[in-house]
Image (spheres, helix red, strand yellow):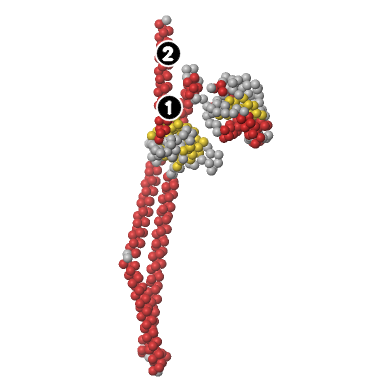
Amino acid sequence: MNRNIAVGLFVFVGLVLFTVGLFMIGDRREAFAKHLVVYTDFVNLSGLAKGSKVQVAGMDAGQVEEIGIPDSPSAKFRVKMQINEKLHGLVRADSFATIGTEGVVGETFLSILPGSATAPAVQPNAVLPSKEPTQLTDLLTQAQGTMSDADNAIRNASGLLGSVGGNLNSTLTTARSTISDVDTVVNGVKRGDGAVGVLLRDPKTAEAVRQSIVNVQQTTQSLLDTSGKANALVTDIRSRNFPQKVDDTLTSVRDATAKIDDASTGVQKTVAELTKPDDSGNTLAANLRDTVANVDAASENFNEDTEALKHSLFLRAFFRRRGYYSLNGIAPAAYRKDRAIVSRKNPRSWLEADQLFGESGDSRTELTAEGKSLIDNTFNQYGDSFEGVPIMVEGYDSVGTPVERINVSRDRALAVQKYLRDRYHISALDIGAIGLNSSAPGGTGQTSWNGICIVLFRSAH
């Protein structure tokens, strides 16, 4: 008798310690804390993944729960995140989300900047505005563009100086040549050389020639004045230190280009230092892959342990009350055996395939306009009683091979699930889809079916 009491005491103490340990682990991972669910959209995730941590004002506040894949290139990734309810007051309607990294190649996380005090607190399931992250490659591209612009500016300045200098030299050369020619002509006339010298013997002709000489002298004086103005212009340019200023500008541009080159070299050295093999010969990419593989393995083990706890005798009721079962995570075999599913309290609507889908090929899983109308008429019979009630869409197919029936029944259930979610704004947590081949669960009034059955789990309440 004493031995039985000792064994019973030992088992009881072990269960108490196991329960305390479980709650301590769950509290550390915030499994039992209240969370706020919000969404945001990104064009580029930059390495953000499911399970990445979420920070509010630099403080760890939750994690990324789910990432929705866009249907087209123009759409964005829909990121679903959980935020600790204690930090709800910092997340406002004008807050926005962005993606950051710890260091150059550190862990990627989702950062939410607090909004203004005048803005209202964000509502559950709201979509926060986002700011796309800045990529290192974009910064390097901008630096290369700046260097190219600086090089073009240097070339344009050199061409301008060459053009101005060439024009000034050409003007001065022309003026000197003209003055030299006029001087030669005047000296020849004074000496009496050639026909002009003969004409000077005639007083009238001499007078005319003198007058011409006067005109030539006036022209020469004008040319001299022009030459003087040109010299003054050159002197003024030199007095204003224009060439020196151009040289200083070019020097500054060269210094800036050299600094950009140094910065680019530093970045390249940093990247090379980070990506070089470690003491064991493993590269950064290999180490990251090993780390991710270890994290995935640990996460898988934790999920398996948690799943086992969900179905344990002592904790099954607790997890069922906490809502830890997913409608989309139930296997067909377990689904058919669940008493809560086949309960007669659950209203069922059986819809035939030829009334909902096409007749051949891919159209066998695509809803027609008549099919959508039939679903609306069927769902409207429930009124507003479906709100807050878990819904399961069962898919059936009795045509084709067993593999084809499994795939077609699953695709049919998913098509109707998507239509109901979009049409009636039902939460993804409240509606599931499952393919049951052609066999219906026992006790539902049908042995086999070809089409869809919509089930409301009122017995779950």
Q: CA distance from mark 2 to mark 1?
A: 29 Å
The spot of residue 452 in percent (x, y) is 63, 28
> Which of the two residues, 349 or 452, is positioned nearer the viewer here?
349
The spot of residue 274 in percent (x, y) is 39, 40
The spot of residue 360 in percent (x, y) is 67, 35
Q: Residue furthest top?
A: 1
9 in relation to 36, above or below: above
Q: Residue at x 49, y 42 (%)?
A: 43
149 in relation to 414, above or below: below
* Mark 2 burial class by Cα count in 10 Å: few <14, some 14-19, many 20+: few
Residue 246, label in figure = none
Residue 11, label in figure = 2
The spot of residue 1 in percent (x, y) is 42, 5
Q: Is residue 207 left or right of residue 433?
A: left
Q: Residue at x 46, y 30 (%)?
A: 296
Q: Earlier in the sequence, mark 2 or mark 1?
A: 2
Residue 33, label in figure = 1
240 in relation to 87, above or below: below
Q: Amino acid at mark 2?
A: Val
